[in-house]
Image: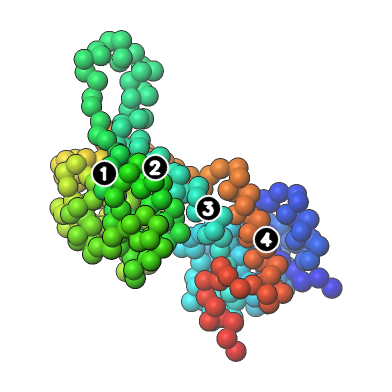
Amino acid sequence: MKPTIIQFMPLPNDLVSKLTDHFEVVEVDNLDQETVNQHPEAFKNAQGLIGSGGKVNEALLAQMPALKVCSTVSAGYDSYDVGALTQHNAILTNTPGALTETVADAMMALVLCAARNIPAMDQWVKTGGWDAAPEKLPLAIDVHHKKMGIIGMGRIGLALAKRAHHGFGMDIIYNARKPHKNAEQEVNAQYASVDELLANADFVCVVLPLTDETHHLISHAQFDQMKESAILINAGRGPVVDEAALIAALKAKKIYGAGLDVFEKEPLVASSELTSLPNVVTLPHIGSATHETRYAMKRDGVENLILGLQGKLAENIINPEALKP
């Protein structure tokens, strides 16, 4: 008899076929209690769980005593209670490798759009501003040969550094938990404290996961340290940046601008001042939103689940301690 798994997001037919080769697949729309109540036996017997966007916590896990592998089709795992999963001897797997290059592309796009005022200029042309008042064309700032500061030199940070250094001749400074030898060798990146990075970078790019230590890492004091000509780019996790402090800094022109793909609360509410400030470029958390990358993430999530339940998974495990006897 095949093990049962719960699939709580749509997957391409070829990937569903892969799953059904190995498992009895129960597809549901979400992980809400109402859904669990509709499929109590499936959740009780499920050894695997695959999807994205659901909340996996103690309440859900109490109803899934057989769970062994939880495969999130994402790099981030904010909605997963890792401690509870570990207590239940269930591993959590993610898909960081599939989205590295695409998110780095999106971050470089935010750098360019925020520096060159691309969204505002697009609207200026489309609404007739070019013809009406060409002398009022606002000037932007250069990107090439500036200094990029990267907070969080992981896979995405390194991919972004390569684009900035090799493509735009930018100097790279970075902060991470430990020196990153590859970054230092490949793009001549220089390690700096957060304070040094904030004081010297023309572009402060945040690529950090959300933890107790990183929550509001960038707040009022940090914006006070940045150059007035600096631009903040955040494509990691929204709450790493104190949004109220960012809005205050932008309004007071303590920094030049910001490019954001993530926010403290998502979707961003229409009443947020970030939607009306002219020196902010906003994206709806779409760093990985390309056809190719989203397919690759789903493919990796399926592979993680299959290998995980076979006891053969060697990477992408968030809590390997759950495997210890």
Apparent side of residue 292 relative to residue 115 in the rendered image (left or right): right
Mark 4 neighbour density, 10 Å: few (under 14) some (14–19) many (20 or more): many
Measured as percent of width and height from the top left, residue 67 is found at 65, 74
Q: CA distance from mark 2 to mark 4?
A: 35 Å
Secondary element at tag 3: helix
Apparent side of residue 260 relative to residue 198 in the rendered image (left or right): right
Does the rendering let one see residue 286? yes
Residue 111, located in which quarter of the rendered image?
top left
Mark 2 neighbour density, 10 Å: few (under 14) some (14–19) many (20 or more): few
Q: CA distance from mark 4 to mark 3?
A: 15 Å
User: Any mark on residue 302, and which?
Assistant: 4
The amino acid on which the numbered mark 3 sits, given as a three-letter code, is Leu
Q: Give the mark nearest the N terminus, 1 or 3.
A: 3
Secondary element at tag 4: helix
Q: CA distance from mark 4 to mark 1?
A: 41 Å
Secondary element at tag 2: helix
Q: CA distance from mark 1 to mark 3?
A: 26 Å
Tell which residue pokes out farthest to the bottom in this image. 325
The N terminus appears in which quarter of the rendering?
bottom right
Q: Nearer the viewer, mark 2 or mark 3?
A: 2
Apparent side of residue 175 relative to residue 17 in the rendered image (left or right): left
Mark 2 touches mark 1? (CB < 8 Å): no
The C terminus appears in which quarter of the rendering?
bottom right
Tell which residue pokes out farthest to the right in this image. 1
Q: Give the mark nearest the N terminus, 2 or 3.
A: 3
Image: 92 above or below 203: below
User: Any mark on residue 146, and which?
Assistant: 1
Image: 243 above or below 130: below
Q: Residue under circle 3?
A: 99
